Amino acid sequence: MKPYIIVHMMTSVDGRIDCPMVGQLSADEYYIALDKLGLCSKLSGRVTAALECTALKEEIALPSEGNAVGMESVHIAKRSDEYTIITDTRGKLRWASGEADGHPLLCITSEKVTEEYLEHLRERGISWIATGRDRIDLSRAMDILGEQFGVKRLAVVGGGHICGGFLEAGLVDEVSVMIAPGIDGRQGQTAVFDGITDRGCNPYRLKLKSVEQWETDIVWLRYTIKR
């Protein structure tokens, strides 16, 4: 029952996704392509949200003290055809409102999140899914997203570690990569898919779906995952 999941990213030729760097190589192409993917809820990780989400009030270094929920919890504050979804394992992000980018917010946390944090979300009309004992159970969260929230298509829009987590969990159906005309080359910069814990060398195999060359020298590649 999970949504159809597309990872959509803009990268340099060497696969790096630092936003200020990529921003020097591109304009609105990323968002134009995102619209072409059709009606999708958009999901990003905590770090990306802290950098880009306009509804964010603050990020705290450590979650507030309080009793952990310790069990799966789901709250639907508002139903919508499209959500702005943020993964935030321990509940570090504090929100000023219940909407971001014109859509209702939905936060996905682990069961280590505190009751105090869920009350913060409730007060702002923010939906949540809390699942996974020590870390977010992405597979279970995606099932809940499809079954209880009715999300049919989901675009994962960053960063590299959350994209890597979805890939490692076997949840990605399609990869949409826009290659900007430039090279980063700096050591330690995050790649499109990063942080995968499997130390083996077996690649995730893809099947090419389409290729587009844009007038701005950006190349848009779309692949499906070979199961």
Image: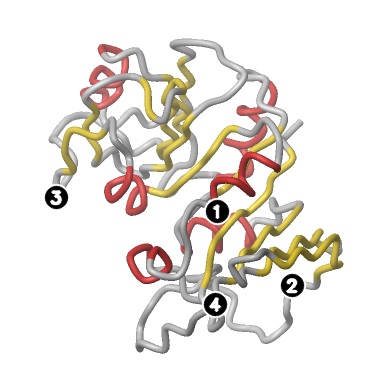
Asked which quadrant contains residue 8, the reply is bottom right
Amino acid type, callout 4: Pro
Spatial CA distance of label 4 from label 1 is 13 Å
Amino acid type, callout 2: Tyr
- Identified at 79% across, 65% down, the residue is 211
Read off the residue under disc 4. 181
**Location of the N terminus (image quadrant):** top right
Instruction: Tell me: residue 51, above or below residue 121.
Output: below
Spatial CA distance of label 4 from label 3 is 36 Å
Q: Nearer the viewer, residue 227 or 136?
A: 227
Label 2 residue SS: loop
Indicate which disc, 1 or 2, sits on the residue closer to the N terminus. Answer: 1
Read off the residue under disc 3. 61
- Say if mark 3 contacts mark 1, CB within 8 Å: no
Q: Which mark is residue 204?
A: 2
Circle 3 residues within 10 Å: few <14, some 14–19, many ≥20: few
Circle 2 residues within 10 Å: few <14, some 14–19, many ≥20: few
Outermost residue toward the front in this view: 215
Read off the residue under disc 1. 30
Indicate which disc, 4 or 2, sits on the residue closer to the N terminus. Answer: 4
- Identified at 72% across, 29% down, the residue is 152
Q: Which mark is residue 226?
A: none
Indicate which disc, 3 or 1, sits on the residue closer to the N terminus. Answer: 1
